Amino acid sequence: MGSEHELPADRSYSKPLGIRFLEYIKKAKLSYESHQAIVLIVTFFAYASYHATRKTTSIVKSALDPQSSDVGLKFPWRITYLSAPESKGLSWVLGDGWAPFNGSDGTALLGQLDVAFLSVYALGMYFSGHMGDRMNLRIFLTVGMVGTGLFTSLFGAGYWAKIHSFYYYLIVQMIAGLFQSTGWPSVVAVVGKWFGKKKRGLIMGIWNAHTSVGNITGSLIASALLSYGWGWSFVVPGLLIAFMGLVVFFFLPVSPESVGAYREEDEVDSLRKNEEEEGVTEPLLGSNTELKEKAVGFIEAWKIPGVAPFAFCLFFAKLVAYTFLYWLPYYISHTAIEGKYLSNEAAGNLSTFFDIGGVLGGILAGHISDRLDARAITAATFMYCAIPALYFYRSYGQVSLVMNVALMFICGMFVNGPYALITTAVSADLGTHSSLRGSSKALATVTAIIDGTGSVGAAIGPLLTGYISAESWSAVFTMLMGAALVAGLLLTRLVVAEVAARISESRSQGGSQTRSEAPELDV
């Protein structure tokens, strides 16, 4: 009985049907650790499916607009390779592309689709965070995933319906972006409620691999299905995320309170506090309940120390990351590597090495920030290291395939490392900041503020790239390096504070050791 930690009789909660089924099979109540494992697994695959649907657009771009690659004057640095057009294979199955994206303004139209999707996504993020702290996150997340699957599939349905209206694809992408905005605030809020700050950076760094796993999965699925028609590249990921939405509905426990799961140390701490209060248990419980039920307002969340600097840092970090997310396969297919051009499918597959590097970067950033207890120092250092990585990839990526893969991997590590750290561990830390006095109702709101602000940058980056790349890809990489620099500089004040704290801590430890050694010398 003591190990099951049942809720008081007057406290009502509802377990997901899948959790009840697992407990029925096990013939016992699931432990706290078992619930944590379920949360990590379900949210991992749930958000991986979000990114799988998001990645498909970048893979299909060259199929929708293959003719833009023939305009060699837009890419003066690769004119010498135009003598071997047969190596490109850009029109291999899909002919002359898909109207209206196969015209002279096709690249700009594709950029407008990106910015429309990401603008609605960024705006929707603020509302999603506000609603997520006030609704059942399991239901909220399920609706978002099923809606995302529906409108992702509707974009692909334009292939069979032979729809050539730009506004159809624009509206579908905007609604899909609105549903996509439900994902991140929800999953971070759920994970943040189940895991404390200890080793949060490492745990969430590993867990955040779902972003790269989703990108890789989306790339591989979309690339493999292109030969059957680009519509399948949207429909299959759409069905996948809808299915995962049902898994979330049946299996995700959104908080320990929702399933009556408590750690033993939590129960011991609660009993100790009750004993210390000596008979004032009733008012104390009433106060705690009120705090838990009160959600933090939008403006109040912005005032939490550290939220604004990290939010604006993420603005520029995501500008870089999402430019790669949406344009890297296109860039690779339009770049002569060893004098040859890769097909759309090969370029899509090759682009996955950026995300593989991102997995390692997220884990390293989380682990390092845990060991140093310095989130800002870690994030800023990674952003500064991303600058030379971007320069070398642009300058030497076309030398050989091996060089391209290696430099792409390094770029992914330094670009996605701080992006992963800020959107996971930092958001969870700030969502449970001491200024909130123990309230957990700010997790989704803070996460939405930080990632929503970052998503504005994510919208601007691909849009600018659509226009700038028509003139020079070198200018695109200059923009990305500048954004990485600004992202690091925005954390300067927090970095200085963390360095000062480390120095003060080391001095205090040194002083305490000197004082403890003094009596021994006297003896």
Image (cartoon, rainbow, N blue to C red):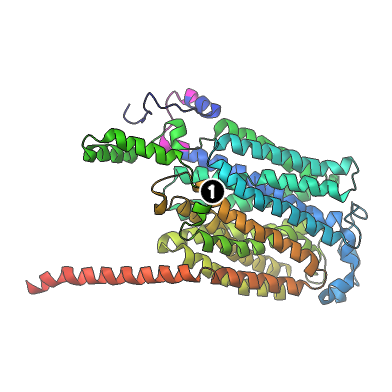
Residue 100 seen in the current view: yes
- Asked whether 233 or 153 is in front, the reply is 153
Is 295 situated above or below 324?
A: above
**Relative image position of residue 75 (x, y in whole percent):** 83, 72
Q: Is residue 494 magenta?
A: no
Left or right: 79, with 57 as reference point: right
In the image, the segment drawn in magenta is 24-35
Q: Residue furthest left?
A: 523
Q: Which residue is mark 1?
A: 445
Is 17 situated above or below 268?
A: above
**Relative image position of residue 510 (x, y in whole percent):** 26, 71
Q: Residues within 10 Å of mark 1 (few under 14, many from 20)?
A: many
Instruction: Kindly indicate the quadrant of the structure image that contains residue 31.
Output: top left
**Relative image position of residue 217 (x, y in whole percent):** 68, 48
Left or right: 483, with 277 as reference point: right
Identified at 69% across, 71% down, the residue is 479
Q: Amino acid at mark 1?
A: Thr
Identified at 75% across, 41% down, the residue is 151
**Relative image position of residue 313 (x, y in whole percent):** 57, 64
Left or right: 260, with 415 as reference point: left
Quarter of the figure that contains the N terminus: top left
